[in-house]
């Protein structure tokens, strides 16, 4: 029996974000190079995308490459970029067939030209798809995103397009890369690490956090269902008391 039968389809999170971690350790455990782990991580990406779309999740954000990942050995960075290009290229038809829109957040102009072009082309080709939005965080860090938002707001104030008094939470949200997405209600991290690692710091203010020891290449559909099950069995209080929540 699968835990999917226990899920309440009326109470699904709209947006799930995942920190895919543990590819390197997964490869090392088998005496293989780290890149082997990343290649197998793509299979887990497919599982997550397919199961999320089948359930009816509307937004799935995957942390694929952080700003800090640029500090990895050059050969690993090159292999990862190549993998992004080939995966996006291979999967574009599947995304189109399944009505899935590809989007990306992060400092995309810092990506190698080939990766940027491939990504942009698939984003454009899938722009009208409506079943689910698959959002890749690439060369992304939350502090970078917030800094960019502050700069853009400051410029508008300087040009008198904006009054400082009109700056509120909504305005800041609209200046983030995720402006057109709801905040994630559920954040999953694999590989037994209990960190957020500069990911969606503003957007996860009220997200439920779910950690699993599974290394990313071993992450299967059932693991996503388990995370959603845990989410559905938590009480989301948003600062209120339990009594307030339960009496409406
Ligand atoms: C973290 O594991 C994983 C990454 C930095 C890369 C994730 C990329 C993929 C799974 C490929 C996905 C492709 C697309 C198109 C989305 P790690 O290397 O930090 O592992 P470790 O913590 O064990 O060293």
Image: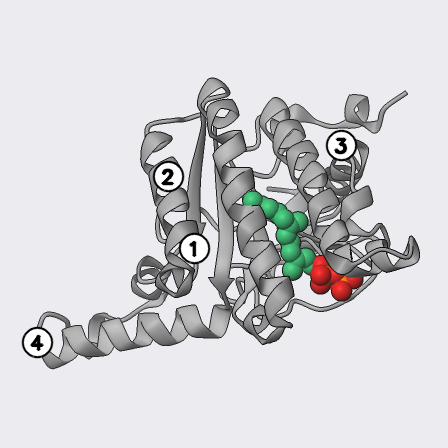
Residue on which the image places disc 2: 123
Q: Are marks 2 and 4 in contact (CB under 8 Å)?
A: no
What is the image's colouring? one colour
> If you read the primary sequence from the N terminus, does the residue marked by circle 2 or circle 4 appear first?
2
Spatial separation of the CA atoms under disc 2 and disc 4: 34 Å
Spatial separation of the CA atoms under disc 1 and disc 3: 24 Å
Q: Is residue 190 above or below residue 167?
A: above
Residue on which the image places disc 4: 160
Frontmost of labels 3 and 4 is 3
Quadrant position of the N terminus in the picture: top right
Left or right: 120 as drawn, with respect to 83: left
Residue drawn at 67 percent across, 28 percent down: 51
Q: Position of residue 212 (x, y in %)?
A: 82, 52
Of 151 and 114, nearer the camera is: 114
Of 78 and 87, nearer the camera is: 78
- Whether residue 163 is visible, yes or no, is no
Spatial separation of the CA atoms under disc 2 and disc 3: 25 Å
Left or right: 88 as drawn, with respect to 12: left
Of 177 and 245, nearer the camera is: 177
Q: Position of residue 168 (x, y in %)?
A: 31, 68
Residue on which the image places disc 3: 221
Of 108 and 192, nearer the camera is: 108
Residue drawn at 65 percent across, 40 percent down: 45
Instruction: Check mark 2 vs ligand 1: CB closer than 8 Å? yes or no.
Output: no
Frontmost of labels 2 and 3 is 2
Residue on which the image places disc 1: 105
Mark 4 surroundings within 10 Å by alpha-carbon count, few (fewer than 14), some (14 through 19), many (20 or more):
few
> If you read the primary sequence from the N terminus, does the residue marked by circle 4 or circle 1 appear first?
1
Q: Are marks 3 and 4 in contact (CB under 8 Å)?
A: no
Q: Is residue 69 above or below residue 220?
A: below
């Amino acid at each position: 029996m699968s835990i999917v039968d226990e899920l309440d389809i009326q109470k699904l999170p709209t947006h799930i974000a995942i920190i895919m971690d543990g590819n390197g350790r997964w490869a090392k455990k088998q005496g293989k190079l780290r890149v082997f782990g990343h290649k197998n991580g793509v299979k887990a990406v497919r599982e997550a995308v397919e199961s999320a779309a089948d359930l009816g999740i509307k937004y799935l954000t995957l942390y694929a490459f952080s700003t800090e990942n640029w500090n990895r050995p050059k050969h690993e960075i090159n292999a990862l970029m190549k993998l992004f290009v080939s995966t996006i290229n291979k999967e574009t038809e599947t995304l189109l067939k399944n009505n899935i829109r590809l989007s990306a957040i992060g400092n995309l102009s810092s990506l190698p030209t080939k990766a940027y072009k491939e990504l942009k082309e698939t984003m454009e080709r899938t722009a009208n798809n409506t079943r689910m939005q698959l959002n890749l965080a690439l060369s992304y860090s939350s502090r970078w995103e917030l800094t960019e938002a502050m700069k853009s707001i400051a410029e508008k104030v300087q040009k008198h397009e904006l009054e400082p008094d009109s700056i509120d939470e909504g305005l800041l949200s609209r200046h983030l890369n995720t402006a057109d997405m709801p905040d994630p209600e559920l954040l999953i991290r694999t590989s037994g690490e209990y960190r957020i690692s500069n990911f969606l710091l503003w957007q996860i203010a009220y997200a439920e956090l779910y950690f699993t020891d599974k290394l990313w290449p071993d992450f299967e559909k059932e693991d996503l269902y388990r995370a959603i099950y845990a989410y559905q069995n938590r009480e989301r209080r948003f600062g209120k008391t339990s009594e307030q929540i339960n009496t409406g």
